[in-house]
Each structure stands twice: as structure tokens, then as C-alpha cells.
Image: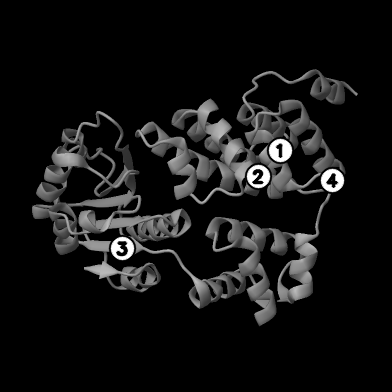
Amino acid sequence: MQLKPEQVDTHLRKQLAPIYFISGDEPLRVMEAADAIRVAARGQGYDERDVLTVQAGFDWGSLMSEAGNLSLFSQRRVIDLRLPTGKPGAEGSKALRAWAERPPEDTLLLITAGKLDPSARKGKWVQALDKAGVVVFVWPLKGAEFNAWVAQRMRQRGLQPTADAVTLLSERVESNLLACVQEIEKLYLLQGEGEVDAGDILNLVADNARYDVFGLLDSVLAGKAARSVRMLQGLQAEGLVPQIVIWALSRELRQLTAMAAAVASGQPVQAVLSQYRVWPAERKSIVAAALRRLSVTQCSALLQHCARVDRISKGRGAGNAWDELLQLTLNLAGHQALPDTARMEQVS
């Protein structure tokens, strides 16, 4: 059965299929559809999840092995299979068809993949997944469809945009969904819920604060440790709450982890940057540098560190959120030790 991304939530309220295959070159919508399936699965007792990433030399036999290895404390499991290239190869195609013919009991298979070309979408393994479960192809949003998505996304965040505001924001982000979400979050953080007109969007565009959160992200990804420390300290001095920096770093690290996995699977860095709609050209070089510097394991560890800082900022863990953010920033920039400027600030 095939569904559109916007139909997934309605489907999940009615039933849960044994197999889900989500494919497309809109990483945000692929990720959100997969997240909705994971949440629904947890609600139905699938409380264990194993993540398998298909890279060069991947052992497809491990797929069936994982299905038979339920822990003593779990009755149901989700196998989260990442297929960045969208090409399982002959062995993978055979394994997926075998799974679809006899899905293991109490195991849900969730596959996320990059965009498939027309011939691949007609492949026997895709048809087998379609017959046994649910297939979701994610297509780019354009024109009025994209504007409608922007308006809906703003309303979900508690914003009430005018038609001009939606049009202006859509033009600014140039159909880049990830960039659009960042701009909406930034708008929400700056002014909270309520009406948004074209003037508010223009003010957002013109916001050139000296220590901008998104500027901090670019500095960190570029590996500029000393500058990143100064920017972080500037944000703290301006009275910014740490949760905003945590949110921005978490979002960046989630995407960076996914891109690092794609690179590790053998995809060229430039192809991955295009797939994830990284723009403009200046930012492409920054993110490419980060991908060359950080492995999938390192990105995952940094994301876990981010979650720990979030707990600290909410009073659910011991420590100082700003101190932890400083260390996280340095680690993401590729430095383990504090630069002299940071030590001087701490001593003073």
C-alpha cells in the first residue's frame, strides 16, 4: 500500500503495518514520517529498537539475525534500517523480498532511504515491500503546495501568518524545508506566538545580531574553536537562555549524523550535501569540512552530549548548562581542550 507523507498520521491512528518503507530526497519529511511511525510503534509495545545502517560490505544476514534476537525484557522490536543510497544490491534485494514474504512476528521493519529512480521504484523488492506493508514516496513540494506547507508549519508553532508573510518566507528559503523550519523556529523564539505579517519576516531577514545562534553553528562546523567560544560567551552575556543554543545544536547534529552515515555508506560528500539541500555554496564548504572531520560515531556521541546538556538546563541533571555547551562546542569544532581565551574567561 502506498501513502503520501501527509496520510501517514491518519493511517497510524487506525493500524500499524509490519513493514514501512520511506524514500525521498526531502530529508525533513522522511525523518518526520519515520518519527511518527516510531512513536506509534512505542505506543503499541514495540519498546526495543535496533538501528542498522547499510554501508559498503553490509551483512544482509544480520537483518534476519536481529529479528530473532529479542531481549528477555522486550516483547516487540523495531528494526530501523537505514538505506542512504536507496540501492540494496542483489543480496539486499533478495533479503528484503524474503522478509516481505514472511515478516517475523512481533518485529516491525522501518526502512528509510534516499530517492529512488523510476526503474528502482518498479523493482521486485520495492513491490514486495508495497504488498506486505506501506510504502511512502516523498516528493519535493513546489509552488502553492510549498506555500501551504509553510503556512501549516507556522500555525503548528502557534504563529498566525498573513498570506504576504507566507509568500515572503517561502521566497526567502527557496523551497528548502530544513531552512524554512529554522526560520520559523527563529521567528518563534524572537517574538513568540501570535500574528505574523510581512514586516515581521523582513525584520527577521534584517536581524544581524552580532552573536547570532545560526552564525555560531557555522563557526563551529567550520572548526573555528576560538571564534566559536567568543560567540557562545557573547550569547550568554546577552542573556540568551541556553535552551535556544541547545535546540540549534541538536537540530544541526541530527542532520549531520544522517549525512555522516550517508558518506560512510559510500556516497560522495557533494552528493550528500545536495540530497540534504545544504545551501548556499559557502555553507556547503563548511558542512563538508565537518563531514570530513567527524565520523558517524562521533556525531552520535555529540548528539547524546546535547541531550545531556538539555537535561541539565531543565534541572534534571547535575552541572552547569553553559559550561557543558562550551565543551560541546569545542568538541564539535574538533578541539578537546579549551583554548587560552576560554580559560582566561573562566579564571576571570
The residue positioned 74% from the left and 36% from the top of the image is 322
Q: Secondary structure at mark 1?
A: helix
Q: Earlier in the sequence, mark 4 or mark 2?
A: 4
Q: CA distance from mark 1 to mark 4?
A: 22 Å
Left or right placement of residue 284 versus residue 272 in this view: right
Identify the residue position indicated by label 1 in the image.
321
On the question of residue 319 being in view, the answer is no
Q: Nearer the viewer, residue 70 or 9?
A: 9
Identify the residue position indicated by label 2 in the image.
246
Q: Nearer the viewer, mark 3 or mark 2?
A: 3
Q: Earlier in the sequence, mark 3 or mark 4?
A: 3
Q: Secondary structure at mark 4?
A: loop
Q: CA distance from mark 3 to mark 2?
A: 31 Å
Q: CA distance from mark 1 to mark 2?
A: 9 Å
Left or right placement of residue 99 versus residue 180 in this view: left
Q: Earlier in the sequence, mark 1 or mark 2?
A: 2
Q: Tag on residue 210? A: 4
Q: Nearer the viewer, residue 67 or 178?
A: 178
Q: Mark 1 and mark 2 in contact? Answer it, CB < 8 Å.
A: yes
Amino acid identity at mark 3: Val
The residue positioned 25% from the left and 59% from the top of the image is 118
Locate residue 9: give its quadrant.
bottom left
Q: CA distance from mark 4 to mark 2?
A: 19 Å
Q: Residue furthest bottom?
A: 163
Left or right placement of residue 282 versus residue 275 in this view: right
On the question of residue 63 being in view, the answer is yes
Where is residue 338? Give x, y as percent: 73, 20
